[in-house]
């Protein structure tokens, strides 16, 4: 092909290219309102889900702590029974200084755990006891099994610990 033909084709091609290309008059330097609202809604959902999971995890941790506290008190009561010729103390204050450094309390409310010596009116010859607390997760399967293990335990949504039979 002669050089002039190639030159003319190039000129025609480049002129068509520039005709098809029109400069944009829209300047997009930011986000639209819809885009911002979508981002805000997604962040709000993530915060809501995260806070729910966090509070649920805290409640489970407190319930676990309550169960561990009752087991520690149970161990101290068994030591006290061995030292007292087979009888349990009539109150938890009898074990706090000798067998536990500090008597555990409910992690959320700071209240004492419920200790009921058996028979109910005993003052010196307590042969058994019920130690109970209320769990935040009332559907915890440990509640039912703890009451089954402790015959005569208080009914309701209490987690109960008693001496091994």
Image (cartoon, grey):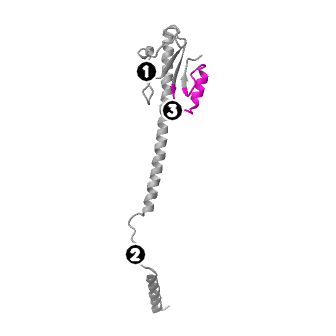
* Residue linked to disc 1: 103
Coordinates of residue 27 in the picture (x, y in percent):
39, 71
Whether residue 13 is situated above or below residue 84 in the rendered picture: below
Kindly identify the residue that appears in the image at 40 percent across and 75 percent down. Answer: 25
Q: Which mark is residue 25?
A: 2
Task: Find numbered disc 1 in the image and state the secondary structure of the residue it sits on.
Answer: loop
Q: x, y percentage for residue 155?
A: 58, 24
Q: Which residues are magenta?
A: 133-158
| Residue denoted by label 3 | 136
The C terminus: image quadrant: top right
Q: Are marks 3 and 1 in contact (CB under 8 Å)?
A: no
Which residue is painted at 45% across and 52% down in the image?
A: 43
| SS for dot 2 | loop
| Sequence-wise first label, 2 or 3 | 2
Question: Residue 141 magenta-drawn?
Answer: yes
Q: Position of residue 7 (x, y in %)?
A: 44, 89
- Ranked by sequence position, the earlier of labels 2 and 1 is 2
Query: In the image, residue 56 lies at what x, y percent?
Result: 49, 38
Mark 3 or 1, nearer chain start:
1
Q: Residue at x 48, y 17 (%)?
A: 76
Q: Is residue 9 above or below residue 61?
A: below
Pointer 2 local density, CA inside 10 Å: few below 14, some 14–19, many at least 20:
few
Disc 2 to disc 3, C-alpha distance: 62 Å
Dot 3 falls on a residue whose secondary structure is loop
Question: Observer-nearest residue: 134 or 82?
Answer: 134
């Amino acid at each position: 092909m002669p050089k002039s033909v190639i030159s003319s084709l190039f000129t025609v091609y480049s002129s068509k290219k520039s005709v098809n290309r029109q400069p944009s008059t829209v300047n997009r330097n930011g986000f639209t309102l819809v885009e911002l609202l979508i981002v805000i809604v997604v962040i709000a959902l993530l915060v809501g889900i995260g806070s729910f999971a966090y509070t649920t995890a805290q409640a489970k941790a407190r319930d676990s702590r309550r169960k561990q506290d009752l087991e520690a008190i149970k161990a101290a009561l068994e030591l006290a029974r061995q030292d007292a010729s087979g009888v349990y103390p009539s109150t938890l204050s009898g074990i706090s200084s000798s067998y536990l450094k500090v008597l555990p309390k409910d992690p959320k409310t700071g209240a004492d755990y419920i200790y009921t010596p058996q028979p109910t009116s005993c003052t010196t010859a307590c042969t058994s006891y019920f130690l109970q607390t209320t769990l935040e997760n009332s559907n915890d399967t440990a509640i039912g099994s703890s009451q089954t293990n402790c015959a005569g335990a208080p009914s309701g949504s209490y987690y109960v610990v008693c001496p091994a039979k």
